[in-house]
Image (spheres, grey):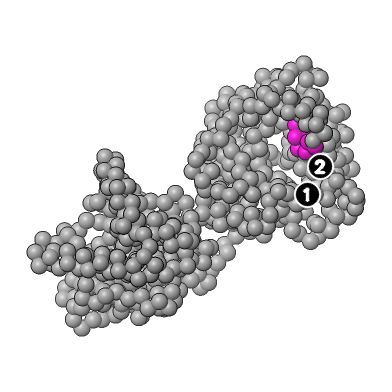
C-alpha cells in the first residue's frame, strides 16, 4: 500500500481544570439535562498511556495532533517534532464556540492544518495493544471501517420507545446518522461504531461534511450533547455508500471496550487479547473504579514514551543496592559488571563482597565503579549476602549471582513497578537455561495481595531463588530477614519468609533474570562432598518451609503441599516446548 504518511488525531480535555470547569458551568442552566456528565470529561491521564501504546505499536505514525480547549497536558513534551497542539479555535468557526460537545468538534477535524490525507482518529481512552502495520487500518488506500454488527438495533429502539425507556444521547446520535443515510441514499446499515480508533481519508471526510452541511449546521449549534446530535459514523456510512471504504464487522479479539466500572481489566485482556481496546469512563463509574485505571495502564505500558517530559533526574531516582558475592570468579565478574553498569537505570550502588578470593577477581572489579567489602577468609554465600545487607544504603536491594545475566532494563522496570505500587517485593521473570520448566515470564505488572496469591504467583515454595526479587531494604531489616550462615540453598528459606511477610508482591514484565548453567558452580559441581551437602541443605530448607507454614497458620504451599499434580503436568508440558536458548541469546541484543 503506497500512502504518503498517516497522522493520528486525538480529542482531549482536562475536566479537572478549574478554569475550564468555570467556563463550562457558566453555559450550563441549572435545570438542563447536561448536569449528569460525570465521566464524560473525566481526566485519568489516559492520554499518556495511549501515547505510550502508539509509540510502541504504531511507530510509523507521521504526526500526532491533539485537539484541546486552550489546554495542554502537563506531562506532554510539546517540543517533540511529531506533536502539535490544536485549539478548538484553530478549526471550529467562532460562532460555535465555546463548545463542550465532542460530536461538534469531530466534524472539523479535516480542517487541521497540515493533516495528512490518510489519518487515524482516537479519544484519549483508546489504546493499541499489539503492533500493527498501516495495512491494519487501510486497504488499497481506503479506510477499513470497523463497526459492530447490530442487526437488532432498530428493534431495540422501537421496544424501548414502546416501553417508555430512555435512550441515551450517544445511541440516538447513531440512529440520527443512519436515518439520514437512509433518507438520502435509501441504504440501510446494520452496523454501529466500535468506539475505538478509526481510520479516515481526509477528502472523503470533507465530502461527507459538505454533503450533509444543512443537517450538520443544526448540530454545530449543540454546545453540549443533545438528542439531535449526529454521530460521526455518518462519515463511514457515506464513504461505504460511495464505495470509498471497506466495511469490517469486528469481534472482541480485534477491538473491545472495557468499562471503567468493570471488575477485572486484566481478565478481559487475557480472554480476548484484542488489537485495540478502549477503557471507557461513564457516569456509572465511581471514584473507586477510576483509581484502578492508572495502575492497570502502568502495568501494560510501563516505559515512558518520547512524548513525555522527563519526570525525574538521576538524583531523584531511588537508590538500588546490588549485592554481588564473589569467590574466585575471575572468569565471570567482568561480564557481570559490564551488564550491570550498562543498565538503563543509573542510580545503582554496586557492592561486591569479596568472600576471600585468591585469584584476580578483585583486580577486575576495581576497574568498575563498585564498593568492595572484604571478607578476610571464605565464609560462604550466606555470609556474603548478609554482609551486603549490612552495608547497603539503597531504598531497594537486589542479590545478583556473578555468572548469570539480566536484561538491560531489569532495574528500571522493577523500580518503576515498586514505586508505582508501593510494594515490599517486586518479582522479575526468570529464564532457566538448563531447567526449562522453571522458566516463568509475566505479561504485565500485577499486584498480588493475599498470601495464597503471593505464593501462587511466585511459586516460592518450589522456586525460592532470591535473585529474581527486588526488595525494600527497610522491609528486610524490619523483619530481620537474614540468610542462614553455613548453608547452601540458603535462599529458599529466605525468599519464602520474605514473600510471607510482604505487604504485596508485584510481578513485572520486561524484567528478566537469566539463570545460566555454569559447570563446577555450587549448584552444578561434580564434587561429591559439595553435592552431598547441597542435598542435605536443600532438605533442611524444605523442612524450614513446612515448619514455617505450620507455625504461621498451617497454610497451603503451591507445588509443595497442594497442586503437586499440576506442577508435574507443567514440567511435562514445558519439556516439549523446546529450548530457552534463543530467548537467552536475544535478551540483551
Residue at 87% x, 28% y is 214
Sooner in the amino-acid sequence: mark 1 or mark 2: 1
Q: Residue at x 74, y 55 (%)?
A: 15
- In this view, the residue in front, 48 or 548, is 548
Q: Residue at x 18, y 81 (%)?
A: 377
Q: Is residue 94 visible?
A: yes
Disc 1 target residue: 37
Give the tally of numbered discs.
Answer: 2
The answer to whether marks 1 and 2 mark residues whose Cβ atoms lie closer than 8 Å is yes
Disc 2: which residue: 225
Residue 333 appearing in the image: no
Nearer-the-camera pick, 1 or 578: 578
Q: What residue is drawn where x is 61% and y is 36%? A: 6
Q: Quadrant of residue 535?
A: bottom left
- Specify the segment rendered in magenta: 166-174
Secondary structure of the residue carrying tag 2 is loop
Amino acid at each position: 500500500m503506497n500512502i504518503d504518511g498517516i497522522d493520528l488525531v486525538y480529542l482531549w480535555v482536562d475536566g479537572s481544570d478549574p478554569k475550564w470547569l468555570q467556563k463550562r458551568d457558566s453555559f450550563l442552566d441549572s435545570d438542563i439535562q447536561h448536569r449528569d456528565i460525570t465521566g464524560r470529561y473525566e481526566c485519568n491521564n489516559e492520554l499518556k498511556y495511549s501515547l505510550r501504546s502508539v509509540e510502541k505499536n504504531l511507530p510509523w505514525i507521521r504526526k500526532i495532533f491533539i485537539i484541546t480547549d486552550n489546554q495542554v497536558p502537563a506531562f506532554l513534551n510539546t517540543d517533540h517534532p511529531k506533536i502539535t497542539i490544536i485549539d478548538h479555535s484553530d478549526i471550529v468557526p467562532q460562532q460555535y464556540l465555546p463548545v463542550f460537545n465532542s460530536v461538534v468538534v469531530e466534524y472539523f477535524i479535516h480542517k487541521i492544518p497540515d493533516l495528512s490525507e490518510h489519518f487515524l482518529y482516537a479519544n484519549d481512552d483508546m489504546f493499541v495493544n499489539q503492533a500493527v502495520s498501516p495495512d491494519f487500518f487501510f486497504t488499497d488506500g481506503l479506510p477499513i471501517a470497523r463497526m459492530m454488527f447490530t442487526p437488532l438495533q432498530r428493534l431495540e429502539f422501537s421496544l424501548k420507545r414502546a416501553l417508555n425507556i430512555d435512550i441515551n444521547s450517544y445511541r440516538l446520535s447513531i440512529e440520527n446518522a443512519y436515518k439520514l443515510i437512509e433518507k438520502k441514499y435509501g441504504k440501510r446499515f446494520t452496523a454501529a461504531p466500535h468506539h475505538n480508533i478509526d481510520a479516515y481519508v481526509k477528502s472523503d471526510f470533507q465530502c461527507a461534511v459538505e454533503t450533509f452541511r444543512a443537517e450538520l449546521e443544526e448540530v454545530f449549534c449543540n454546545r453540549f450533547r443533545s438528542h439531535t446530535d449526529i454521530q460521526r459514523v455518518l462519515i463511514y456510512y457515506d464513504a461505504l455508500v460511495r464505495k470509498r471504504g471497506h466495511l469490517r464487522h469486528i469481534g472482541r479479539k480485534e477491538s473491545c471496550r472495557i468499562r471503567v466500572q468493570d471488575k477485572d481489566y486484566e481478565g478481559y485482556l487475557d480472554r480476548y487479547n484484542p488489537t485495540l481496546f478502549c477503557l471507557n469512563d461513564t457516569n456509572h463509574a465511581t471514584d473507586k473504579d477510576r483509581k484502578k485505571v492508572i495502575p492497570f495502564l502502568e502495568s501494560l505500558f510501563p516505559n515512558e514514551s518520547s512524548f513525555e517530559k522527563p519526570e525525574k533526574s538521576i538524583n531523584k531516582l531511588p537508590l538500588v543496592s546490588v549485592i554481588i558475592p564473589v569467590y574466585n570468579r575471575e572468569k565471570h565478574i567482568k561480564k557481570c559488571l559490564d551488564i550491570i553498569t550498562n543498565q538503563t537505570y543509573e542510580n545503582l550502588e554496586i557492592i561486591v563482597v569479596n568472600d576471600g578470593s585468591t585469584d584476580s577477581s578483585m583486580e577486575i572489579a576495581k576497574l568498575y565503579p563498585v564498593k568492595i567489602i572484604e571478607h578476610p577468609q571464605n565464609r560462604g554465600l550466606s555470609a556474603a549476602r548478609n554482609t551486603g545487607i549490612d552495608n547497603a544504603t539503597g531504598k531497594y536491594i537486589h542479590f545478583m549471582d556473578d555468572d548469570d545475566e539480566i536484561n538491560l532494563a531489569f532495574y528500571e522496570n522493577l523500580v518503576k513497578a515498586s514505586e508505582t505500587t508501593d510494594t515490599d517485593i517486586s518479582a522479575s521473570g526468570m529464564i532457566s537455561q538448563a531447567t526449562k520448566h522453571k522458566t516463568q515470564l509475566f505479561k504485565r505488572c500485577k499486584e498480588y495481595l493475599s498470601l495464597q496469591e503471593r505464593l501462587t504467583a511466585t511459586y516460592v515454595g518450589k522456586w525460592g531463588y532470591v535473585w529474581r526479587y527486588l526488595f525494600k531494604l527497610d522491609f528486610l531489616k524490619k523483619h530481620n530477614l537474614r540468610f542462614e550462615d553455613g548453608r547452601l540453598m540458603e535462599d529458599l528459606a529466605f525468599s519464602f519468609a520474605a514473600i510471607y511477610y510482604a505487604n504485596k508482591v508485584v510481578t513485572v514484565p520486561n524484567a528478566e533474570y537469566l539463570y545460566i548453567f555454569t559447570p563446577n558452580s555450587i549448584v552444578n559441581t561434580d564434587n561429591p562432598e559439595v553435592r552431598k551437602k547441597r542435598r542435605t541443605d536443600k532438605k533442611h530448607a524444605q523442612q524450614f518451609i513446612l515448619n514455617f507454614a505450620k507455625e504461621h497458620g498451617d497454610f497451603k504451599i503451591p507445588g509443595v503441599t497442594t497442586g503437586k499434580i499440576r506442577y508435574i503436568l507443567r514440567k511435562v508440558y514445558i519439556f516439549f516446548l523446546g529450548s530457552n536458548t534463543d530467548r537467552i541469546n536475544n535478551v540483551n541484543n
